[in-house]
Amino acid sequence: MQVDELLKPFPIKEFHPFPRALLGGLRGSDTVHKIVESLKYHGLEVVVYDKVESNPKDYNVMDAVAMFQETKCDSFVSIGGGSSHDACKGARISVAHDGRSVNEFEGFNKSENPKNPPHIAVSTTAGTGSETSWAYVITDTTTDPDNPHKYVAFDDASVTTLAVDDPVLYYDCPLDYTAQCGFDVLAHASEPYVSRLNFPPSLGSALYAIKLTAQNLSAAVWNGQDLPGREGMMYAQYIAAQAFNSGGLGIIHSISHAVSAFYDTHHGLNNAIALPRVWAFNMPVAYQRFADIADVMGVDTHGMTAVQAAEAALAAAIRLLRDVGIPEKFTDVTQDSYSKNRLGKGPTKYYENSPTISGDAHDVDRITNHVLGDACTPGNAKECTFETVRPVVDHCMNGDLDDLLS
Ligand SMILES: [Fe+2]
């Protein structure tokens, strides 16, 4: 990816459309089986690809493409979180280009053929927003194994045909995933609210998504069958994605992508750890915006200066992170501390060389360099250089959250 291209300013603001959506009301569990049986009952033939990994890899996408072509399919249904939807979006783009590698479409609107198979996306997590966004994220495993590469493709041709969000489908989402996905939502909402793109149509939805997350995440985490909590997070994740869709992201996501690239850790977990550090980094260029965030997070900002209120927002985010039990820095993330972590036991030999997150100087350097090449970085509120971002990455790896509290 050409970093120069990514770091261009944004001379034109563009609003990217959303797909049709059905929200709330479906019932049931055993989700995939029931959807497959329902499709068959209605006379459709179905083949299932169920090998998509967390942080979907290019080979997951290409295996799905091969199955699609060999079995002469004509459309897609993805069921799951962002990994399933993103792999499916990438597969559709590849199918529309005679099975060319998905990695050829990294970047902005790289599809040459805008037409690809129909896609219904059914979400089983409240985090991704992929079912309604123009983004998909893939790990390229064909690059130098010492420098793996996770990239975002933004492509209007990847937008799904129909999004289905039902809070009942989240009931089976484990506690730790629920918490981590919730911080993906907080990142999706807060990054466009302070982004240098400063896109007014995104600001209201961004702020409301933060409010919904502050009000509902703890309930959804600690009682997975709390319908109001799950429903609140459903709307939070849906409208947060619609905020970033045109309003941009920032280096919470860039750091998250880099750590996933090297360690295959969960996107939401990475976002949660990066979020307080990046808020603190960006705050000096957006105190009033962070003061607004404090307000919707339930802080009584009456009588506070914008700086004080912004700092209170950061304190509220750290409190929420602690309330929902997320590790506080990357070197705390071990196989023992994080049940779903696949550190060192990934599905391929690719990750066997990364049994623990080292956080040493070499690690911080390579993660910082990955951040600077990420498509989300140009939208970050504050200018990013190696010198300014490296301490942020270092703090994510090794720093104490209490350092950020004044
Ligand atoms: Fe995300």
Image (spheres, helix red, strand yellow):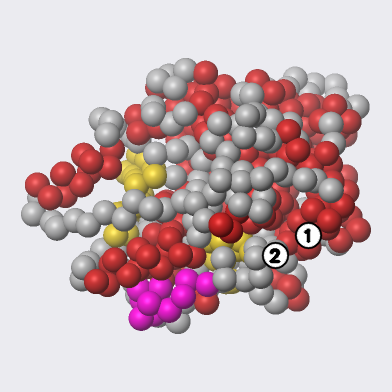
Q: How many numbered badges does the structure rendering display?
A: 2
What's under tag 2, amino acid-wise?
Asn
Residue appearing at x 35%, y 68% in the figure: 65
Q: Is residue 364 visible?
A: yes
Query: Magenta residues?
Result: 94-103
Residue 366's label in the rendered image is: 1
Going from N to C along the chain, the mark reached first, 1 or 2, is: 2
What's under tag 1, amino acid-wise?
Arg
Q: Residue 360's spot in the image, x, y percent?
A: 84, 48
Instruction: Tell me the quadrant of the picture where the N terminus can be found.
Output: bottom right
Q: Compare residues 353 and 316 and report the one nearer the observer.
A: 353
Instruction: Tell me the quadrant of the picture where the C terminus can be found.
Output: top right
CA separation in Å, label 1 and label 2: 8 Å
Identify residue for label 2: 147
Sort mark 1 into few (<14), some (14-19) or many (20+) by Cα contacts within 10 Å: some
Q: Compare residues 398 and 243 and report the one nearer the observer.
A: 398
Q: Contact, CB < 8 Å: mark 1 with mark 2? A: yes
